Amino acid sequence: MINIELKNVSKRYGDNEVLHNIDLSIEQGSFTAIVGRSGCGKSTLLRIIAKLEQITTGELNFSSNEASNPKIRIMFQDDRLLPWKSIIKNIELGAVNPAVAKESLEKVGLIDKQHDWPDQLSGGQKQRIALARALASNPDILLFDEPLGALDALTRIEMQNLIEGLWQQQKFTSLLVTHDVTEAVRLADRVIVIDRGAIQLDERIDLPRPRERNDKFTYYETKILNQILEG
Amino acid sequence: MKKINNWYNNQLIPWLLPIIAIIIWQILGQYKIISSSILPTPFDVIEAAIQLTKSGKLQEHVWISTQRALIGFFIGGIIGFILGLLNGTVKFFEKTTDTTMQMIRTIPHLALIPLVILWFGIGESAKIFLVALGVMFPVYINTFSGIQNVDRRLIEMGSVYGLSKWKLFVNIILPGALPSILVGIRYALGVMWMSLIVAETIGADSGIGFMATSAREFMQMDIVVLTIVLYAILGKLSDVIAKLFEHRFLKWSPVYRKK
């Protein structure tokens, strides 16, 4: 059981304050989305949790019953597959063992591509491989840094369903950074709006899964969108 | 995709120009338009090659030159590779040695010949030293810059996945730098033959360069031209081998995967 806890976290690059006194705690196994305009600091927040960036002031804690270091993985905007390794070898890089690698390649439905090179795959397929690689390492926390941003609309929907399904199976804590409000409402239990380095809105999405685009969905969507647009 | 089938995609086409040149050369020599004391005909050169092969001299000299080239190449290549690796991966080495290396690199290594002869005489070590020195820098520079230019995003991914320093090196840094390293090796092979030719022409009692200088003293034009042809063949051969390595190690790249 792992919670992510940020206390009074600020991040500065020189004089430029990107994040200002962020207080946030994320429950184990939940799916949280962080939305905001470009440059609002949402990606920085994700990179801080992934320990790719240092905090200027404040605290980041992972409280856990098992008292072990949580395994954190990221799906980046780009796939970041190693071009010199076959698909299966790429997944094995993150995998606990080769059997798990195969299994997670099956989960994303690309087992027949296991011996291909990454550049023989389409953009959507590559992101599915990146997802399989992250899953194969059996993460406690999976961070998504706009991983679907570069995909076409249809592939996006497929990927959203895939991510949702796998999250329901494996129950890793998910944190999705996106600028797409519909995607956030479609996937997350909780949507956080960040603007000018601070949390402006923290909204629970109380909708049954799988989610449909009904009036309640639109209500959340409009509320969040208005918050972003009006600032 | 439409299959491109232009007439010049034939495998023999690259050889057309050299063959035509040789035929013209033969005709010009045969009809005494060019005197054989200026340029012997291709048949003369081939005959010289046959004569020297029969006496065993040709194989002996080629073998000695090849040995020198390879020993020098491995010594220089390994030193350049290791220095490139150290400077590319460890900041301390880069800070302390890269500037020095870049300074020494700008000296044409063949300018050191007088010094090398004074140090080593005209024995084997002088030639091997020159080849090694010439080979070292292209391998060094390409290894170093290859490592520096490995995609940072992939290294970041590796660290998110908790790869150890060694695993990061083996799985990401080295394969990422390999295309550049192979370019360095290919270039170094050219430098290798060039350094050897110069070293052997200046002072040697065996090898292809020696064959050329002693033939010159006896005005044996056919042998002089033969040695030039030999260098061309050996140079092309090492380039082919380097290309094979590229195809073997970079088969993941679409550039090398296509036939």
Image (cartoon, coloured by chain):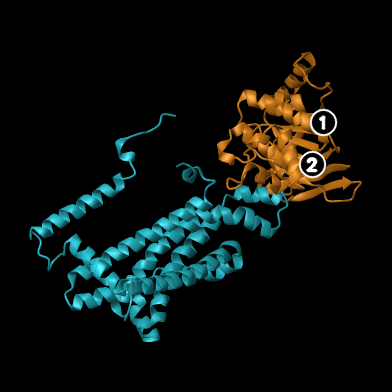
Chain colours: A orange, B cyan
User: Which residue is pictured at 26% across the width and 67% down the height?
Assistant: B50
Tell me residue B48's x, y (percent): 22, 68
Quadrant in which the N terminus of chain A is drawn: top right
User: Which residue is pictured at 16% across the width and 57% down the height?
Assistant: B26
Q: Dot 1 surroundings within 10 Å: few (below 14), some, or many (20 or more)? A: few
The mark found on residue A168 in the picture is 1
Q: State the residue lying farthest toward the top.
A: A215
Tell me residue B125's x, y (percent): 42, 80
Q: For the residue labelled by badge 1, is the local secondary structure a helix, a strand or a loop? A: helix
- Whether A122 is drawn above or below A213: the answer is below
Is residue A194 in view? no
Q: Mark 1 lies on which chain?
A: A
- Whether B231 is drawn above or below B122: the answer is above
Q: Which residue is the site of mark 2?
A: A141
Indicate the amino acid at tag 1: Gln
Between A67 and A34, which is closer to the camera in this rendering?
A67
Q: State the residue lying farthest toward the right.
A: A65
